[in-house]
Amino acid sequence: MEYDYVPLFFGNSHPASQAWAVFTAFSAVGSMISVTYTCVRVKQTIAWTNILPWSPLWRSSAPVSRREPKDYLELRILNNQHAHNPYDLSTGEPQGGLILHWIICVVYICATSAISVVTEAIAFPGQLLSYAHAIVGVVLGVMFPKFRSIENKVPMTRQWDPPSRESRWLKLKFAPIIFGWTYAIGSIALLVLTVIGPYKNADGSERVVKGWFYPAVSFGTLLMSLIYYLIFIASTEASLVRAAGIQIRECRHGENDRERIRRRCDVCQDSPQAHRHARDGYEHYFEVVVPDTHDRGSFLYWFFGGTEERHHPRASEQVNMVRAVFAQAKAHLKEMFRKPSGLSRNGGANGDT
C-alpha cells in the first residue's frame, strides 16, 4: 500500500491531496525548466569550442538588441568599432542549444518507444544519465587528490570573486585521498550492482530494460566519441581533416579572437591575456583553417562550420562583391556632388557677365 505522507499529515483530506498534487507539479515543472536550461547552456558552451559538427548553428543565440550583427557585412563593421553599449555584446535565449537539446530529446523518445512497459520507458533516460554520472564520478574521485584550483584570471578590479579560502578539512594530509576514493568506491559500486541480475521489478515481474543496457549504451557512446576525437581533432598532422587539406588550429579566448565580436566577453576589454569566457566558460577552442586554394564549398568545410568569421562557403567572394558595390556607389555619389557645384560656378560666371 502506498501513502502520500504530506496529505496524511494534514488530515488526508481531498483538498490536502489536491494541494499536494499542485505543489508537486510546480516542483516538477521548475526542475524541468532549470535542468533544461542548464543542459542547453552546456551544449552551447561545447559548441563554442568548435569540436561539434555545425557548431555555428548550435552556439547561436537570439538577438537581444537591434545592434546584434545579422550578417557578415554588419559583423565586419562592428569588428572595426568599439562597443560602448554593454547590450551590443549581449545575447538572448540560446536558440542553437535549444535546437540541439530538442534533437537529443527526440532521440531519447524514439529509443524508448520500443520499451513496452511505460514506467521503465520513462525511467530509462534518467537512470542512464545517473549511470553516466557514476562513470564520471569514478574518474573524478580517483583524480581528486591531483586536482588544483583553476587560476582566476579575471581582473581584480571587477571584484567578482572574493579571495578563495581552502576548506580546513582539505588541509589535512590524507583528506583529499579519503574523500575522493570514498566517492569513487561508491560510484564503482553503483556501476557494478546495476549489471548484476536478476533483473526484476519490486513486484517480482521481469524487467524489460536489462541492467547491461546501461554500460552498453554509456561505454558505447564514449567509444564513438573517442573515435570521433581521434579521427578529426587529436592530431593536426595525421587526422582525416589534415588529409583533406584542411587544418584545425587550437586557439585561446582573449588571445586569438580579440577582433571577433561574437566571441568577445565582458572581461576582454580589461584583460590583455587569455582567459575563460565570462559567460560561456571556455578558454580553448578549435578553428577550421582552409587554404585560399582549397574549395570552400567542400563537405568538411561545411561540416565543421569553416573559419570563425567566414563560416559560409565563398564568403570572401561575397565580401569582395559588397565592397565593389560600395565603391561604385561612392564614386557615383562623388559624381553627383560634383555636378551641382559645377553648375553653381557656371551659373555664377554667367550671372556676372
Image (cartoon, grey):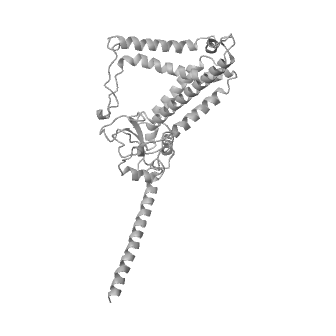
- Determine whether 5 is above or below 96 in the image: above
Q: Quick one: quadrant of the C terminus?
A: bottom left
Residue reaching furthest bottom? 353
Answer yes or no: is residue 213 visible.
Answer: yes
Residue 250 image offset from top left, x and y in percent: 38, 38
Q: Is residue 137 above or below residue 291?
A: above
Q: Is residue 289 visible?
A: no
The one nearer the camera, 192 or 204, is 204
Q: Which residue is pictured at 36% across the width and 76% down the height?
A: 341
Residue drawn at (47%, 21%) of the image: 136
User: Which residue is located at x 35 percent, y 19 percent?
Assistant: 146
Q: So how many labels did they put on this image?
A: 0
Image location of residue 234, percent across then percent down: 42, 33
Task: Judge whether 90 appears above or below 127 on screen.
Answer: below
Which of the 4 quarters of the picture holds residue 114? top right
Give how far across and how far down residue 158 sits, in percent: 32, 34
The answer to which of 101 and 243 lies nearer the viewer is 101
Classify residue 207 as left or right of residue 168: right
Residue at point 59% right, 31% down? 105
- Which quarter of the rendering shows the N terminus? top right
- Depth check: give the residue in front, 30 or 189: 30
Horizontal and vertical percent position of residue 44? 48, 36
